[in-house]
Structures are given as structure tokens and as C-alpha cells.
Image (spheres, grey):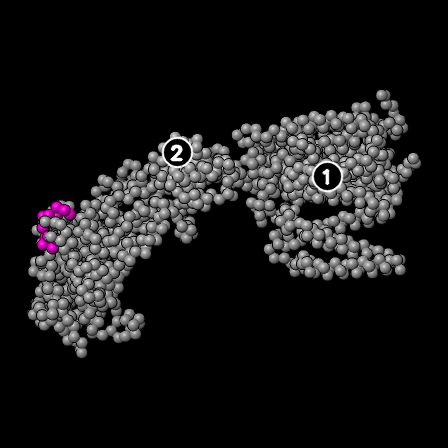
């Protein structure tokens, strides 16, 4: 194919026949670094290799890169109408996973046999991106309407709910920001998006409040005790429901704007209170504690605080240059848990130091900013939406995983894309970037 | 299908939202980079230290405890003998085999399985830190283990010498014993370099000179992983242990054995002391115990059982018990009388067998009376009536001040823990405690060493030492010298310490010595002190205890009576408690001891030579 200069369309310096070399280079570099540290995590201090995860990861990487090439040349346009079926297929897989799935780390999230298996919840992320993209493009500007916004949210809530049943809270949570990202780009009303952001934030606070009171703060503030008390919670619930009804009535009778905002806030509180109460019914206090322990890991240094303390120590002790590849002590003396998956960043930070971290940051930034550039330059709304969904997904993984490794985010078990050991997440990441690549190629074909 | 996306998708609001996303992403990465900079570079040293601490362990290299010798420095009284401790490293035992291996090792070491389960709870199963399950394991069992090590994964052994206390067993009170430091002891001693797991002296010399005996532990470092598995040992910063010093006691093994046998199985004590230096040559307290039991399995139960024994074997009766001195106190009275009264020696009193004071009658031990006696006669016959008169003439204040001069009522400061001070009553004390006035009758009782006054056998020895030394008491002690454990070089020689110097005239003491000689030559002890090996001087004492026909029996003596070299002199004090059948054993035991020491004989030879009337036929000696 020969590409000519169309008006407004230029060939990028890093593109070879539209194929985004820079994107590919960054992804490949990250995968190589990932394999290096998966290898490192499987070597003991005496130099004995105790894990063959790195070999498996190489296989995943090679096949994944093959998929990357294939998907790079599959037109994203095909997904627009296929996405419904992909979505339904995903839902079916997620429905059966809790029943026939293999249990790993307490969650039935695996499908497959013997050592080979996939996590439908990983591929599900991409599936909802494609389907949400279709939905948002088909409603167009009507997305500003509350009803259309809510239908979009329901599309995401269904798989989220199914994944929570596995139960895999960490993976389920990722679906939420994907929706927010795409809704934001699709032009949804800011008040709707803010409602979800604030309500979920408030829910998180209310859910963890009693655990924070019991474990983190030895003696709670009276206000805190009041809020985390279940009896007063019921009064709050009732009064919020009453306020909401009055506000709705008032809005329809008098058509005053302030009734809208009163109803908006009271509903937000109502949902958060319900979420808090629901979480306490279905989650044990210690499960909640695991999510908030990062606030003060020292209260349980040998138990739930262990992972965070060891990870922060690993990262901090890396210093500027790091301890050198294969020379980390926290990792090779096995103080650091789950080194090849959740805490791969910690072993990297320990052995390659600040320099290595910044290198990885730059590679991630290349992928993300490149992705946004593709979105920005694209003229097709479907491409814009699925592109931003992919960028949002990758960004959220990086933020939560690295935040967890340095101790400023709760431990959720979200892998670090491209680096963490695991076929499903690597394939999902590679296919996602391939879709970005394909969008990039397409915008020249107009 | 109609494309719902016109140019509007690239409108300004959509672009603004994309810019927002860029700012969000770039901002997050910037914040994370700053956070990492702070964590890895600004605070990096904190975490580097933390990472080091979490992997580095200090290993204590125990120091060899010093040995204890008698004054001749030939055979050790206490030594360290080779012994082994068996450890379990829980992580090295496959869980499937755990039960089987526990059964095997229990059978081999003869221990209960519950003990292992208690020391190695399931939460340790993944750890690689050795846990001791038994110490004091014999070489034979270790040899078996070594041959069959394939059947015992996770089982290891190491050298752990145990303290062996050799005979004579009667040294148990002096030597004491060692044990693991308790939490209470650790709280007090932590700053003195003791750590958990330290072996320390619990009583006797082991406790008194613990710091010297124990030496200094060494240290080395190792790197461990999360399961406490040793990865490598580090020699940087290694400190070698310094072995403890050897201690040479003033005790003479032969005299100790002689005294032990002379006292025999009678509850009581013997002290043999060198008055010229304060050195204790022998110290026996019966019943004694076996210091070796504390290094055996189940020592706690044995200790409990022994503690409940009514004969209290853990009490060192020579220094930890005080009794009424009875007639032996007349040595103090005699000294006071001579010092206070110019013509004391020629002062006579008539003894009719009883003494009337006010409306009370005080009896003499000899109901028929002694007749007219002078001071020497009074002491020789131990006439109570004579000393009732002496006591009344001196008055209670003088008796008290002379008693104090002889060191009564306060500890001698011997280098053994737990010494008692005895008691010298005063009128003020009686009024305060008993709310009764001090009466003349109390003075009369005190004059013959009865009533409230109590004296420990060691203090009794010091009374005699003061008379022998003519006014000086040297602090009694057990430490002769300290030697280097390797070269045997003498590091410290303990010099005599003057405990007390009296202002009593030397001439007074010379007269008291004469009076005490009279006790042997023509007095109460004449019939029992039959030894021809040496001339001695002394005083008997028989104290009432309220039990019919049971008396504490004292004998305090020194020998030789006359000598040009005061270094040759020894003081012998024997105290036999009223708990025993009355045999008047104290002077009889002293007789054998004097014979043995001065004729250089052991107990058996001394008895054979003496062929005393009081042993003939009784215990199979001819």
C-alpha cells in the first residue's frame, strides 16, 4: 500500500506504514523488563532457579505479540457490531466461572484445564470497552440524558456484579473507572459522572469507617463513632430517604433548581449509606481491614500489614541506582510476597532503584500519551471511545498497582500491565494496545 | 446507517475533556515520581537500614564458664563436661513425616511427645530456626543420631557443655548452681550484658562471682531469609567470646570431706576458718543437695520437691540460720568481765544450783550446783549462776556493746549470698516490739546466751577468731584467687580484709584464751576432746529450745592453743540442731576434725586413731 498525503493527514515519524513503532517499542521494552524481573523473583539468593514462571511468561509474551500483530491489522470497525455478541459471550463466561472455575487465592476466577487457563474477567475489560463504545456512539448526544447514562452504567454493573461473586473485588473495581473514562469522553453530563465519583468515594469511606475506627485510630472522634454506628446509620438512611422524597416532590411541583441539588446530594448519601450497610453484611471486618491497612500497616506488621511494609522497604531501600539485578535482599530473601505478580514493581524498584522506576514510568507514559494522541487525532467517535476506554483501563491499572507497591493505595490484587506475570492480563493489555495501533493506522485511510 | 458523529465529535468540549485526561495522567505520574524520589532517595537510608535489619541476625557464641577449684588448685570442684543439645529445625521436616520423626526422636531421647509439640507449635512448621528440645544428651545417643541421620531430617545437635559438680557433695551450698535466666532476673540484669537464654549463677559462688565466671559472650552475624533459614554467615563485626575466669576457693577439699563426715547425717553445720586471714577452709551444712540436678530434665519438679522438704536442704545453715548461742556466749561475757573489772579473774561467786532474782528463780544446768568458783572455773564448768552474777554486774548495755564488738547482730559480709545477721536484743527493741519493759530477768537470760539473742555459726566462728587474733576479725571469705582459664596464671590474689578491730586490750584476750583452754583441760569439754594431735581451747554450748530432751549443741574451738605462727591456727565451729536426737555431738565432731587436720588424717584414720568412747560400738567402728 502506498500512502499519499491527504489533507490534514500526515505520516508520523515513528510509524511504519501506519504501524506505530514507538508504541510497539515501549510495549516490547516493558515486556522484556517484566520477564527479567519475573526471572529475578524466581531465583533464590543462592542462585537457584525455583520458578519457571519466566519461561511461561516468555511463551505468553511471544503468543501475545503474535496476537498484537494480528489485532493490529483487524479493523476496529469490525468490533462495532460484533461487540454485542462479544459482550454476551463474556457475560456467559462470567456466569459459569464461579461454578466451574478453578480457585486461585480464594477466588474462582479461572477457566481452563491443568496449568493452562484464562481469566474471563481480564478479557471482560476489553469486551465492555468495545460494547460501551458501541452503546455510547449509538446514543450520541443523548448521553446527557440520565436514562441513557444509567443504561450505560448498567452495562458495566452486570459484569462487575458477576466478578464480585467470584469474589475478586480488585478486578471488579477496574470496570468502574473504564466506564467513567468513556462516559467522560463521550460527553456525559458532568453532574452524572461526579455523582458516581462522589457516591463511590463516600461509600468507600463509610465502608471502611468502622474498621478505621477499630484498627487505625485507637480512640475515634465522636463524629466518627456516630457515623460508624449502625443504629444512627438507620436514622441517617431514613432521614435521607425522606429528604429525597421531599426534594423530588418539590422539584416536580415548583421546578426549582435547588430541589434538584438537594435531591442529588441526599440520594448520594442514601446510596453510600446503603453501600456501607451492604458491605458490612457481606464483608467481614478483616476483609475491609485488608483494604485499609495501607493507611497504617504497623498495627499488624506480621499479618495484613506485612505485604505493604515489605514492599515499601523494598522500594525505599532501592535508593537511586538500586541494589543491582538479582541483588535485591527483600525479594531474594523472600520477604516480599507475590513478587512476580502484584509486587513486581517493588522488586524492580529494589534492584533498579529510582532510575529503573523512572524508565518504566517513561515507557508507560509513552503508551498512554500515544494512546491519547491517537484518540485526539481520530475522527471516528467509536475509535475515540474505545481508545479512551483502553487508555483509562491501562492508566488505572498502573496507578493502583504502583500506588499499592509504594503504600499509598489499598492492596487490591490488580496486576501491573505488561510487567506482571500472567497470560490473561498480558494478552488483554497487548490486544488493547493492538486496537490502539489499529485506530492509529486507520486514521490515515480516510 | 446514519453516522451520528459529524464534525461535532471534535468540538471544543470533547477536546477539553481529552486535555483533562492528559493532565490527570501526567499529574499522577509526576506525583508518583516525586513520591518515589522521597521514598528512595530522601528517605532511602531509613529503608536500607530496615532492609538490613530484617535480614540480619546476631548469633551469640557462648563463652566457656570458668571452673571452680579448692585452695590446692588441683582437681576442679566444678567443671564443664562435654554434653549435647538436640535441636529441631521445623521447616526441614516434611509435614508428612513429622509425626513419624517425632515418635522416633522421642524414643531415642526418652522424652514425651507433648514436650516437642509444646516447644514446636504448628505455627513454627515453616520456620528454619533451630529449637532446642533436649540438652544434656549423651555422646552415645548423638553417635546413634549421626549414624542414622537419614531417618532424622530436621534434627541436629550441637555442643552444649553442662556444669558438673564433683564431690564433696556438701559443697553444694557454697558452689550453688546455675540455670537459665528468668524474665524477672533479666529485667534487673539487662543492662549488665545479660540476654535471654543466658545461663547464670542462681546461688552460692556461682551467683556471687557470676560476672567473673561467665566471661563475655561472642557474637557473629548471619543473613536469614523470611523463614529464618540461614543464607550465609558474616564474619564482619564478629566478636570472639572471652572465657570466664577460674576461681580458686579457700576451701580445703580434705578438710571439707573430714568435716562432712564428722558431722555425719545430723541437721547442723560445721565451719573451719583460718582466723589469721578469714579464709574459710570448710563449710558444711546438713542436709545438702546435689547441684547437678539442675542440669537434668525435670529439674523444676525436683526443685519443688526439695523446697518442701521440712529439713530445708537449700538453706546453708552455716550462714543462713541463727540460733541462741547459749553457753558459747559466755566467751563474750568473760571477755567483757575481764575488760571491765580489774580483778575479774579472781572474782568468785557461789553456785547453789539456783539463783533468785526478785521473785524469780533461775536454775543452773547442774541442779546440785558448782559451789564456789572463780571466773576460769565458771567458764570451764560453764556455770550459769556465775554468769548470772557477771551479767547483772555488767548490765545489759555493756553486754550489748560487747556483743556488737564481737560482730553479733550484723552480717560478716562473707562472699556468699543470703547471709543472715543474727540478732542482739536491746531494751528499746523489746519495748517497741513486745511493749514490755526490759527486766533484770532478761539480762540474766542474755548472760547465758538465751532469750532473744541469736547467732549464726559463722558469727560464732568470728567470736573465736576475735579472741584468737586478740582484737581483730578478718572478713570471712571463700575466694582465694582468680586464675586465667587457659594459662592458669594467677590474676587476682584476694588479700585479707579487716572486718573489725576492737579496742579491748590484748591482755584481756590472752586471759580469755587461758579460760577457754580450761574448758578443754578440766572443764565441760574435757571428756570429749580426746585428741592428742593438738592442744585446743574452746567453749561448749547447749541451748534450750523448749522441746524436752532436745537441745541445740554448739562447740566453738581453736587450735593449736599455743603457737609461734598464728597462720597455723584454725577455728572450728560445730552446730548441731535440736532436731536431731541428743548426742552432744558438736564437741565430738570437733574432736574428730581437730584430730584429722592436725594429724593429717582422713576421717576414718582419725576415728581409728582416736578410738573415741562415744563412737565405739555405736557405728561399727572399733
Q: Nearer the viewer, mark 1 or mark 2?
A: 1
For the point 80% across and 47% down, which residue is it? A193
Q: In this view, does B123 lie to the left or right of B296?
A: right
Q: What element carries label 1?
A: helix
Q: How far apart are marks 1 and 2 (CA)?
A: 56 Å
Q: Alpha-carbon neighbours of circle 1 within 10 Å: few (<14), some, or many (≥20)?
A: few
Q: Does the magenta stretch include residue A413?
A: no
Q: In this view, does A303 lie to the left or right of A236?
A: left
Q: Measured from the top left, where is residue A96 in percent x and y?
A: 73, 39
Give the image quarter of residue A306: top right
Query: Residue B555, located in which quarter of the rendered image?
Result: bottom left
Looking at the image, which is closer to me, B542 or B190? B542
Q: Which of A406 and A427 is in front in this view?
A: A427
> Position of B415 compared to A322: left or right?
left
Could you tell me which residue is drawn at 65 percent across and 43 percent down? A411
In percent of the image, x 82 and y 31: which residue is there? A76
Write down the residue under mark 1: A96
In-front residue for pair B506/A323? A323
Viewer can see residue B47: yes
Mark 2, residue position: B145
Which residues make up the magenta segment?
Answer: B603-616
The outermost residue toward the top is A1
Residue B89 visible in rendering:
no
Image location (x, y in percent) of residue A188: 84, 45
Amino acid at each position: 500500500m502506498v500512502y499519499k498525503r491527504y489533507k490534514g493527514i500526515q505520516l508520523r515519524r515513528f510509524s511504519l506504514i501506519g504501524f506505530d513503532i514507538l508504541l510497539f517499542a515501549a510495549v516490547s521494552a516493558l515486556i522484556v523488563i517484566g520477564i527479567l524481573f519475573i526471572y529475578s523473583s524466581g531465583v533464590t539468593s543462592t542462585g537457584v532457579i525455583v520458578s519457571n514462571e519466566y519461561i511461561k511468561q516468555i511463551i505468553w509474551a511471544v503468543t501475545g505479540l503474535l496476537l498484537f500483530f494480528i489485532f493490529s491489522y483487524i479493523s476496529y470497525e469490525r468490533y462495532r457490531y460484533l461487540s454485542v455478541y462479544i459482550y454476551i459471550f463474556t457475560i456467559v463466561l462470567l456466569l459459569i466461572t464461579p461454578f466451574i472455575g478453578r480457585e486461585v487465592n480464594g477466588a474462582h476466577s479461572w477457566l481452563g484445564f491443568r496449568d493452562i487457563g484464562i481469566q474471563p474477567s481480564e478479557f471482560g475489560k476489553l469486551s465492555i470497552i468495545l460494547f460501551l463504545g458501541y452503546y455510547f456512539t449509538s446514543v450520541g448526544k443523548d448521553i446527557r440524558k440520565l436514562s441513557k447514562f444509567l443504561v450505560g452504567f448498567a452495562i458495566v454493573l452486570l459484569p462487575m456484579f458477576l466478578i464480585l461473586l467470584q469474589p475478586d473485588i480488585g478486578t471488579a473495581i477496574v470496570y468502574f473507572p473504564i466506564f467513567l473514562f468513556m462516559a467522560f469522553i463521550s460527553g456525559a453530563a458532568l453532574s452524572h459522572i461526579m455523582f458516581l465519583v462522589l457516591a463511590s468515594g463516600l461509600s468507600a469511606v463509610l465502608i471502611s469507617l468502622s474498621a478505621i475506627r477499630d484498627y487505625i485510630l485507637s480512640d475515634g472522634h465522636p463524629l466518627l463513632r456516630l457515623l460508624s454506628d449502625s443504629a444512627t446509620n438507620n436514622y441517617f438512611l431514613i432521614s435521607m430517604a425522606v429528604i429525597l422524597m421531599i426534594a423530588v416532590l418539590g422539584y416536580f411541583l415548583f421546578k426549582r433548581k435547588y430541589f434538584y441539588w438537594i435531591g442529588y446530594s441526599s440520594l448520594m448519601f442514601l446510596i453510600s449509606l446503603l453501600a456501607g450497610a451492604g458491605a458490612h453484611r457481606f464483608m467481614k471486618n478483616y476483609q475491609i481491614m485488608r483494604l485499609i491497612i495501607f493507611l497504617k500497616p504497623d498495627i499488624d506488621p506480621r499479618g495484613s500489614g506485612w505485604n505493604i511494609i515489605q514492599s515499601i522497604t523494598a522500594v525505599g531501600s532501592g535508593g537511586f541506582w538500586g541494589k543491582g539485578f538479582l541483588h535485591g535482599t527483600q525479594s531474594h530473601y523472600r520477604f516480599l510476597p507475590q513478587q512476580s505478580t502484584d509486587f513486581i514493581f517493588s522488586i524492580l524498584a529494589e534492584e533498579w532503584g529510582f532510575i529503573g522506576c523512572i524508565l518504566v514510568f517513561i515507557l508507560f507514559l509513552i503508551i498512554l500519551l500515544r494512546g491519547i494522541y491517537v484518540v485526539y487525532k481520530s475522527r471516528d467517535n467509536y475509535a475515540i471511545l474505545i481508545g479512551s476506554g483502553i487508555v483509562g483501563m491501562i492508566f488505572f491499572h498502573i496507578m493502583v498497582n504502583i500506588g499499592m507497591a509504594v503504600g499509598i493505595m489499598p492492596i487490591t490484587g490488580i496486576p501491573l500491565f505488561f510487567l506482571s506475570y500472567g497470560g490473561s492480563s498480558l494478552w488483554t493489555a497487548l490486544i488493547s494496545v493492538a486496537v490502539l495501533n489499529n485506530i492509529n493506522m486507520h486514521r490515515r485511510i480516510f | 446507517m446514519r453516522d451520528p458523529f459529524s464534525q461535532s465529535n471534535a468540538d471544543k468540549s470533547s477536546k477539553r475533556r481529552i486535555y483533562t485526561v492528559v493532565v490527570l495522567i501526567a499529574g499522577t505520574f509526576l506525583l508518583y515520581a516525586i513520591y518515589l524520589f522521597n521514598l528512595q532517595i530522601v528517605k532511602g537510608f531509613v529503608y536500607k537500614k530496615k532492609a538490613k535489619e530484617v535480614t540480619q541476625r546476631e548469633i551469640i557464641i557462648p563463652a566457656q564458664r570458668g571452673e571452680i577449684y579448692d585452695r590446692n588448685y588441683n582437681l576442679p570442684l566444678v567443671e564443664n563436661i562435654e554434653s549435647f543439645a538436640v535441636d529441631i529445625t521445623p521447616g526441614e521436616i516434611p509435614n508428612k513425616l513429622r509425626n513419624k520423626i517425632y515418635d522416633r526422636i522421642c524414643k531415642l531421647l526418652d522424652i514425651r511427645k507433648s514436650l516437642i509439640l509444646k516447644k514446636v507449635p504448628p505455627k513454627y512448621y515453616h520456620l528454619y530456626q533451630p529449637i532446642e528440645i533436649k540438652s544434656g544428651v549423651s555422646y552415645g545417643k548423638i553417635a546413634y543420631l549421626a549414624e542414622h541421620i537419614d531417618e532424622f531430617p530436621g534434627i541436629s545437635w550441637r555442643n552444649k557443655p553442662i556444669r558438673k559438680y564433683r564431690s564433696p557433695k556438701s559443697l553444694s551450698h557454697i558452689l550453688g548452681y546455675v540455670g537459665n535466666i528468668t524474665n524477672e532476673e533479666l529485667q534487673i540484669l539487662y543492662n549488665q550484658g545479660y540476654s535471654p537464654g543466658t545461663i547464670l549463677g542462681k546461688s552460692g559462688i556461682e551467683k556471687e562471682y557470676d560476672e567473673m565466671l561467665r566471661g563475655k559472650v561472642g557474637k557473629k552475624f548471619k543473613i536469614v531469609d523470611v523463614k529464618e533459614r540461614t543464607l550465609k554467615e558474616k564474619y564482619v563485626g564478629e566478636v570472639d567470646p572471652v572465657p570466664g575466669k577460674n576461681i580458686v576457693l579457700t576451701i580445703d577439699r580434705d578438710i571439707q570431706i573430714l568435716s562432712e563426715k564428722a558431722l555425719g547425717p545430723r541437721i547442723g553445720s560445721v565451719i573451719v576458718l583460718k582466723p589469721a586471714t578469714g579464709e574459710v577452709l570448710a563449710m558444711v551444712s546438713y542436709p545438702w543437695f546435689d547441684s547437678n540436678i539442675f542440669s537434668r530434665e525435670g529439674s523444676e519438679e525436683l526443685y519443688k520437691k526439695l523446697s518442701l522438704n521440712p529439713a530445708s536442704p537449700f538453706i546453708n545453715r552455716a550462714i543462713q540460720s541463727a540460733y541462741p548461742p547459749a553457753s558459747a556466749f559466755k566467751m563474750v561475757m568473760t571477755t567483757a568481765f575481764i575488760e571491765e573489772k580489774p580483778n575479774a579473774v579472781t572474782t568468785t561467786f557461789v553456785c547453789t544450783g539456783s539463783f533468785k532474782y526478785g521473785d524469780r528463780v533461775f536454775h543452773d544446768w547442774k541442779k546440785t550446783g558448782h559451789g564456789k568458783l572463780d571466773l576460769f572455773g565458771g567458764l570451764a564448768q560453764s556455770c550459769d549462776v556465775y554468769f548470772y552474777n557477771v551479767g547483772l554486774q555488767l548490765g545489759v548495755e555493756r553486754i550489748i556493746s560487747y556483743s556488737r564488738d564481737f560482730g553479733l547482730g550484723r552480717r560478716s559480709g562473707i562472699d556468699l549470698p543470703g547471709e543472715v545477721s543474727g540478732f542482739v536484743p536491746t531494751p528499746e527493741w523489746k519495748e517497741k516490739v513486745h511493749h514490755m519493759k526490759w527486766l533484770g530477768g532478761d539480762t540474766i537470760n542474755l548472760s547465758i546466751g538465751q532469750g532473744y539473742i541469736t547467732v549464726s555459726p559463722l558469727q560464732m566462728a568470728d567470736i573465736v577468731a576475735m579472741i584468737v587474733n586478740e582484737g581483730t576479725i578478718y572478713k570471712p571469705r571463700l575466694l582465694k584467687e582468680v586464675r586465667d582459664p587457659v594459662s592458669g596464671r594467677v590474676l587476682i590474689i584476694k588479700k585479707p580484709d579487716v572486718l573489725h578491730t576492737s579496742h579491748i586490750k590484748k591482755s584481756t584476750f590472752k586471759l580469755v584464751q587461758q579460760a577457754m583452754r580450761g574448758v578443754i583441760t578440766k572443764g565441760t569439754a574435757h571428756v570429749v576432746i580426746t585428741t592428742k594431735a593438738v592442744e585446743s581451747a574452746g567453749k561448749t554450748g547447749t541451748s534450750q529450745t523448749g522441746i524436752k530432751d532436745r537441745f541445740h549443741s554448739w562447740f566453738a574451738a581453736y587450735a593449736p592453743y599455743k603457737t609461734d605462727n598464728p597462720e597455723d591456727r584454725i577455728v572450728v565451729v560445730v552446730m548441731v540442731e535440736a532436731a536431731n536426737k541428743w548426742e552432744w555431738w558438736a564437741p565430738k565432731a570437733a574432736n574428730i576434725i581437730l584430730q584429722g587436720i592436725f594429724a593429717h588424717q582422713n576421717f576414718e584414720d582419725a576415728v581409728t586413731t582416736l578410738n573415741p568412747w562415744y563412737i565405739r560400738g555405736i557405728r561399727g567402728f572399733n
